[in-house]
Image: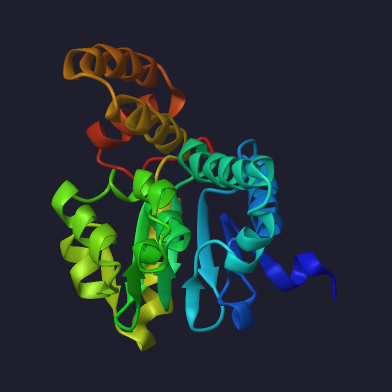
Amino acid sequence: MSTNKILLNKIIKGNIFEITLNNPSRRNPLSLELILLLQKMFDALKTNKKIKVVLLKSTGPSFCSGHDLKEVKSFSSSNRKLKNLFEKCSEMMMTIRELPQPVIACVNGIAAAAGCQLVASCDIAIATKKSFFQTPGVNIGLFCSTPMVAISRKISPKDMMYMLLTGEKISAKLAKEFKLINVVTEQKQFQKEIEALSNKLIKKSFQSIKIGKIAFYNQLEMPIEKAYDYTSKVMTKNMQAKDAKEGIEAFIKKRTPKWSI
């Protein structure tokens, strides 16, 4: 079995692309090798017109334990290697935002440090009740500075500081209250929830989702006036798209729209 297959599995089910972190004995750490494998997959998905939804899953008791601390320790004598690791990880996280497809984190276990960052970088997150979320860097003298970038853009500053300063695990229920995740489900309903949400999304216009997802993240960091100016231009362009015309026509005629993709 190749190293790639040990770390990562992929399955295509129609319009759905499933990526499964598959290193359960090590609790699915974000090693440099895994980061580069994810980056390669995400880069390929950018131009894939068939795939409409991406699922990020895992095997074992951990969704993702964060960076591989043994690897981090081995890099500690070289600032260049450490900087490269964190830069590659940040690039991979940003690529999730840049994908035209919605990315759903399917969390069944603990998501810690950069693993929690991975969840926050996804567009939507579903978790089982037995899942936990943590930014534990403070417990080992290594503040979770890069993970907080993605997480702090999803939850409030006070909730973020609580996680960062205590380093404690928070339950899926509390993570939902913090708005880090969208859905909490029983273990036996987990797959059904994933399938229901995935099927709901693939029935929408992929053309409009692609336009909208990119616009959402672009406007998020803009001052409000600039955001309105930018999104007005996006809406104008979107209105000229084939799916928008079809959707409006279908709504007026009270029929089901037929999307272009």
Relative image position of residue 164 (x, y in whole percent): 28, 58
Furthest residue to the right?
1
Determine the residue positioned at 56% across, 77% down: 27
Give the position of the C terminus as an image quadrant.
Answer: top right
Determine the residue positioned at 22% across, 51% down: 155
Tell me if I can see residue 199 in this picture: no
Determine the residue positioned at 36% across, 43% down: 149
Relative image position of residue 14 (x, y in whole percent): 61, 59
- Along the horizontal axis of the image, is 6 left or right of 194? right
- Along the horizontal axis of the image, is 98 left or right of 9? left
Towards the viewer: 41 or 63: 63
Towards the viewer: 208 or 81: 81
Furthest residue to the bottom?
188
Relative image position of residue 184 (x, y in whole percent): 27, 73
Towards the viewer: 201 or 255: 201
Scheme of image coloration: rainbow
Towards the viewer: 251 or 223: 223
- Would you identify the image quadrant in which residue 251 lies? top left
Furthest residue to the front?
77
